[in-house]
Amino acid sequence: MTALAETVAHPAPIAPRMIAAGALGNLLEWYDFAAYGFLASIFAQNFFPGSSPFIGLISAFGIFAASFLMRPLGAVIFGHMGDRYGRRRALYVSAGMMTVSTVAIGLLPTYAHIGALAPVLLLILRLLQGVSIGGEYTTAAIFLGENTHPRRRGFVTSFAAMGATGGTLLGSAVGALTASLLTSEQLVEWGWRLPFLAGVVLGGFTLFLRGGMGEEPGHVAPSHGEAPLVEAFRVEWRNILRAIALNAMLGAGFYLVFVYLTTYMHQVDGLTERQALQINTLSMMVLLVCVFLFSTLTDYVGRKVVVVTGLLGLLLFSWPLFLLLSSGNAFQAQLGQIGFAVLIAAYAGPMPIMLVEMFEQRTRCSALSVSYNLSMGIAGGTAPMVAVYLVNRTHDDMAPSYYLMVLAAISLAAALTVKDRTGRALG
């Protein structure tokens, strides 16, 4: 075994600070994305006030989708940076960009103050966030996966997934708390700014931790003078296509179930915004715990069996779970979303390390980031907008469940072709 292989296969125990630095960036980035999604109806009122409620909501979710469509560009930029100059540098720059743009949204003038320029500036800031998040999640998972023992990769990389889940949970909790403490008028007038301004604390702490991580061991830049992305497509194109299909359900499922459903429960079920956010927050807590449990379980039973089981469950149970969600009863809606939380955790929790183990070290950041973010940009960012369109177009409240079932079938077919590398040295 070569010195590099030994370094990759049996690295020194990963420091808690490195785990925290990897997880907190995801917490920051998903916190902001979640906060925007949960407050979409408020953004519609403040930035598209002359539109009908439907058009305003579609416009707000359209900006949400546009930021996702920038993620592939971020994947190219930060994937190149991570492969060429090291994972740590890419993680530091992405966290800084996200912190600045998040706080700027909290300071943004509304349509009432500057007219049509307001939604334009909102779009620009969301596009910057899309670029930033394009390399964050995947680079953090790679950083953690490459710097821990093969038999503990599921456990350690679960903190990347937990950071993303925790950020969405934090966004939901802050949204619920803000809605609980303020009147509807206060929330529309100025309360919506608070979750974004609070991002400066989380962002500052993340930058502090990442500034002291040190360089990762065993990093080797791509050979032949090629750009990492070019080499990735030349060598890993089959796995790139497989990863795009594998992540289709992840993008749509996560953002439809844990972002759009707060709007769905309010508009379709007739629940108050406070009830919808409280239901979502409890479900996210279940998701957070289950992500850790299922990711750790893969160290013992393998990644593939857990991922396939989760996808099969989503294919079979999306319709009955949506039936509970559309019942108009808060308790049944809670049960439906918790059911989704468990199934998505089984699929999404092990996904970071499964993807890390699919690609070669030299081009891992570029290959993984581009494939993941292409899928998330196409299926994830558009999911809330597609759901709103399907419900309004078909007049069928169950329409989003059919969409999820189709994507679950696509991702399941891809998962069945993955070679399980649990416990093996990374290439």
Image: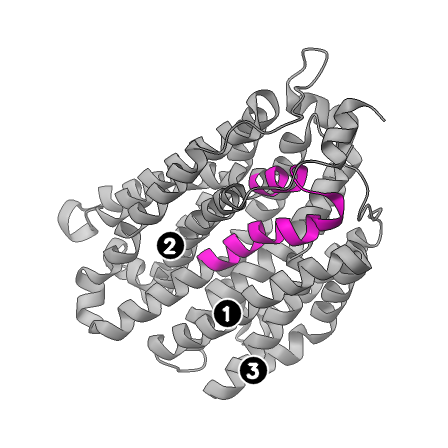
Residue 288 position within the rendered picture, expressed as x and y whole percent measured from the top left: 55, 64
* Range shown magenta: 140-167
Q: Amino acid type of disc 3?
A: Leu
Count of labels shown?
A: 3
Q: Dot 3 corresponds to which residue?
A: 335
- Tell me, yes or no, whether the two marked residues, 1 and 2, touch with CB atoms within 8 Å: no
320 lies above or below 175: below
Residue 215 position within the rendered picture, expressed as x and y whole percent measured from the top left: 54, 27
Q: Dot 1 corresponds to which residue?
A: 285
Q: Quadrant of residue 189?
A: bottom left
Q: Residue at x 61, y 54 (%)?
A: 158
Label 3 SS: helix
Q: Quadrant of residue 48?
A: bottom left
Label 2 SS: helix
Q: Which label sits on residue 388?
A: none
* Neighbourhood count class around disc 3 (C-alpha, 10 Å): few under 14, some 14–19, many 20 upward: some
Residue 263 position within the rendered picture, expressed as x and y whole percent measured from the top left: 42, 69
Which badge, 3 or 2, is on the more N-terminal residue?
Answer: 2
Q: Residue at x 39, y 82 (%)?
A: 271
